[in-house]
Image (tube, rainbow, N blue to C red):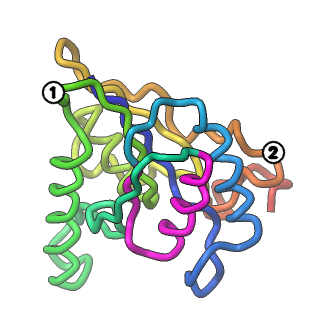
Amino acid sequence: MRFLYLARHGEATPDETGLTDTGRRQAELLGERLRDLPIQVIHHGPLPRAAQTASIVSAHLPGVPVHVSEAAGDYVPWFPGPDAFPEEDREVGPALAREAEAAFTGVTDEPRTELVITHGFLIAWLVRAALEAPEARWIGLNSGNTGLTCIRYSPDRPPAPLFFNDLGHLPPELRWTGFPPALRPSGTD
């Protein structure tokens, strides 16, 4: 059995070179939430916002190895049509999505609990895959910054998303970062 925890990175600076003060606080609170789980490894994407979030979270999980993974990066995993994006993006993104599915999903030989600190697109893609939904269904699944998702993979049943975009570790004023303004409840800007 495998428990795959997926977390979106903390709020990034406008130039995406790191985390804002809010993003660092979100990562601290995520680390506190995860500290009592039997996480065996942390994977994160190569961009600074994911790497810094992983560093902050890992401070709450002493001894847990941390690995950078291109497959946990920020890319578009599937495209709706051949002309939607440049050809290079249409090749790289889906290839990395296949690599992420191979690395992070499915049943393992021994029980495993992993954390992947990544970006909203990959979280949506892996939830879509767990539900065996059509490829286009990843579009529109949004995760807030440090939103936590968990998918269980067991040998005797289909993959099961146990929860999606759980923001319970964050106080209300930190919960709606990362969502487009149109998706936020009124009064949360």
Residue beneath disc 2: 171
Indicate yes or no whether the magenta region holds residue 136: no
Residue 79: image tag? none
Q: Residue furthest front?
A: 63
Residue beneath disc 1: 109
In the picture, residue 169 is in which quadrant?
top right
Classify residue 8 as left or right of residue 98: right
* Residue 75 vertical position relative to residue 121 in the rendered view, above or below: below
x, y percent for residue 180: 62, 64
Secondary structure beneath label 2: loop
* Residue 125 vertical position relative to residue 11 in the rendered view, above or below: above
x, y percent for residue 75: 32, 69
The amino acid beneath tag 2 is Pro
Q: Residue at x 29, y 32 (%)?
A: 131
Magenta segment: 42-60
x, y percent for residue 120: 46, 57
